[in-house]
Amino acid sequence: MAQRVAVPDGANKKTSRVRVAVRLRPYMDNQDEKDLGPCVRGLDSQNLEIINWRNATETVKYHFDAFHGEQTTQQEVFLSSVKPILPHILKGQNASVFAYGPTGAGKTHTMMGSSDQPGVIPRAVGEVFKLVKAKDEDEGWDYSIGMSYLEIYNEKVLDLLSPSSQDLPIREDKDKNILIPGLTLTTISSFSEFDKHFVPASLNRTTASTKLNQRSSRSHAVLLIKVVRTQRVLPHRQLTGKLYLIDLAGSEDNRRTGNQGIRLKESGAINLSLFTLSKVVDSLNSGTAVRVPYRDSKLTRLLQDSLGGSAHSVMITNIAPEYKYYFDTFNALNFASKSKLIVNKPFTCETVAVLPVKRAKEDHKAGVSGTEPPKKRHKGDRKTEQDGSSPCADFHSPSEPSVMDRLVALEKLMMNCQDKDKLSMLSVAQSRKEIQELKEKHREFESKAMLFSRLAGEKSSAKPEPAFSNNNAPLQRKQSNATNAKKQQAVVQPLQVSQFQPLQQLAVVKKQSVCVKKERKISDPVEPPDGKENSWELQLETSVLEHSRQKILHILNTGSLKELKGLQQIGDKKAKLILGWREIHGHFMKLEDVVKVEGMTGKRFSTFMKANILSAMGK
Ligand code: ADP
Ligand code: MG
């Protein structure tokens, strides 16, 4: 058995990092029924921006190791993101290249391509043969190349070169090499021989996909190219380098792709591998994880020796520019990059100009005067306000109302994580003052907004500027909008102006700690069956209680299997059901949503809460 070589990292300590490239596929008319134009665009070879769903005057800017724009050819993607890692395979090191992103964003195009535009797979295999051929005969090594091709579907490992085979086990040998006993490994001596095996196996998969309800978008196709290098003379040392080329399952939300009907277990498992991969990449790239959760799914277990450590890995995140992909694109970008920047820059004037009119009309219809301040609206109207003022309102169909809720929750969650520490340090007095100021500003903006929306109504017949018309415009600060008549229209969405967001959070947090009765409403707990069971909560200080609640919610939404099991009252089965629920439904908006998980009754929820809050407080 070939030995895995421990390669000293030496100067390059960052080898365990997964390089992240983003590829934006060209805009397609037929994917944009409403003719809204693109919602995302590249800025340069490493940066891109996407419109901020909360405020059309802003974009969110992301930075990556590489950005490949719409015009990038297959050859360019290969040369910049894949070719540089291939020589390592011949030295006995491992590597992996995977295409991530929503279905329809170009993963298969990137990995497989077509006969006239071959993708990463044929180019990489061709290059490996070229590298081997170019090796100097006199170096004293023989090379042999083998291929395996498998699919991970529903957490089952299936051999695509031997389609009748059953789920295969994944094992680790004493040298920590990962192997799959029983998996076909076919020796190939030329590219055409590779093609001979690869093409029919890929077709097998495609045929299965139509029968099995889009299976190909839910399974991971994993091609393994194994290069074994053997010394001709004694002691016949042998080095094996593995290259994994992976077309991942679509990263889109299961709820929007008609998965609601399938069984929880199946649905949860479909993306358990993808979900765990996200966590693995995140741990590797943040460099903070004590334990990388490779063992939590089949895909990551398989890649354990080829992702992180001394392996070379590239993730190509594929995204699509049309608005209908917005939510999935946003998620994919957030997964791929933890660093982002909100930039105040109108993306398209179209969204900016149209929305206020719509909102003014809606207000009118609802019998609310256009100049009426928001305080007169009912609490339940808040969501509608956000929907109406967000660009998303235009591109998500009414049949998808939960998308907005989830974006709000997602953002709250992110804000919570970032600002929690800062917030807890602010004094109550200071916060009260800020809340007061905020409320005043809020009112002031609201009345201006109403004024502008009327103005915008008068100008609504004006032709909107085309998307990207401001491509070269310098970045502007938000304040400058107030002096520009045209941009003032953009201020029509002042409720979501970015500087408000942290303060709104602050207002909520502080309300919770200052006003006990209201706090109960905010956190909206499930009523205990007998009305008494939660009396223990009343004995706790409200802010402490809320803090514990947030902590538990955070674990429920982001915790690994092990972390979930670390919660009181959560065993292996329940933790898996929670993971499964998350896979289908996204995040728990509030703790009480846990009752939606199979087997979690209202009563069990109360016990769960009590045990966890008391445990968090050491009672
Ligand atoms: P996925 O595998 O992510 O579901 P596909 O690779 O099947 O997406 O791409 C969806 C469609 O978009 C296909 O018709 C594909 O040919 C086309 N496409 C994707 N990326 C590009 C690109 N970079 N250039 C041209 N067409 C592309
Ligand atoms: Mg595909």
Image (tube, rainbow, N blue to C red):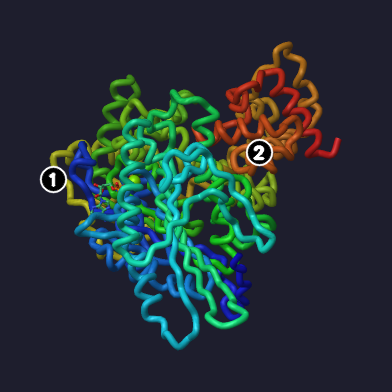
Q: Can residue 400 be seen in this view?
A: yes
Measured Cα–Cα span from mark 1 to mark 2: 47 Å
What is the number of the mark on residue 550? Answer: 2
Residue at position x 43%, y 37% from top? Answer: 253
Q: Within 10 angstroms of label 2, few (less than 14), some, or many (20 or more) residues?
A: some
The outermost residue toward the right is 619
Residue 611: give x, y in percent of width and height: 78, 30
Decide which of 187, 147 is in the foreground and name it. Answer: 187
Residue at position x 59%, y 51% from top? Answer: 301
Kindly tell me whether mark 2's CB lies below 8 Å from ligand 1.
Answer: no
Q: Which amino acid does label 1 sit on?
A: Lys
Instruction: Examine the rendered structure and indicate whether residue 186 appears above or below residue 550.
Output: below
Please give left or right for residue 476 compared with residue 426 in the image. left
**What is the quadrant of the C terminus in the image?**
top right
Instruction: Examine the rendered structure and indicate whether residue 402 appears above or below residue 26.
Output: above
Decide which of 545, 188 is in the foreground and name it. Answer: 188
Please give left or right for residue 389 compared with residue 310 in the image. left
Decide which of 619, 389 is in the foreground and name it. Answer: 619
**What is the quadrant of the N terminus in the image?**
bottom right
Q: Is mark 1 on a helix, strand or loop?
A: loop
Mark 1 touching mark 2, by CB under 8 A?
Answer: no
Residue 278: give x, y in percent of width and height: 52, 50
Residue 403: give x, y in percent of width and height: 41, 34
Residue at position x 61%, y 72% from top? Answer: 5
Please give left or right for residue 443 compared with residue 347 in the image. right
Q: Mark 1 highlights which residue?
A: 463
Quadrant in which residue 608 is drawn: top right
Q: What element carries label 2?
A: helix
Residue at position x 78%, y 39% from top? Answer: 616
Q: Within 10 angstroms of label 1, few (less than 14), some, or many (20 or more) residues?
A: few
Q: Can residue 439 be seen in this view?
A: no
Decide which of 433, 509 is in the foreground and name it. Answer: 509
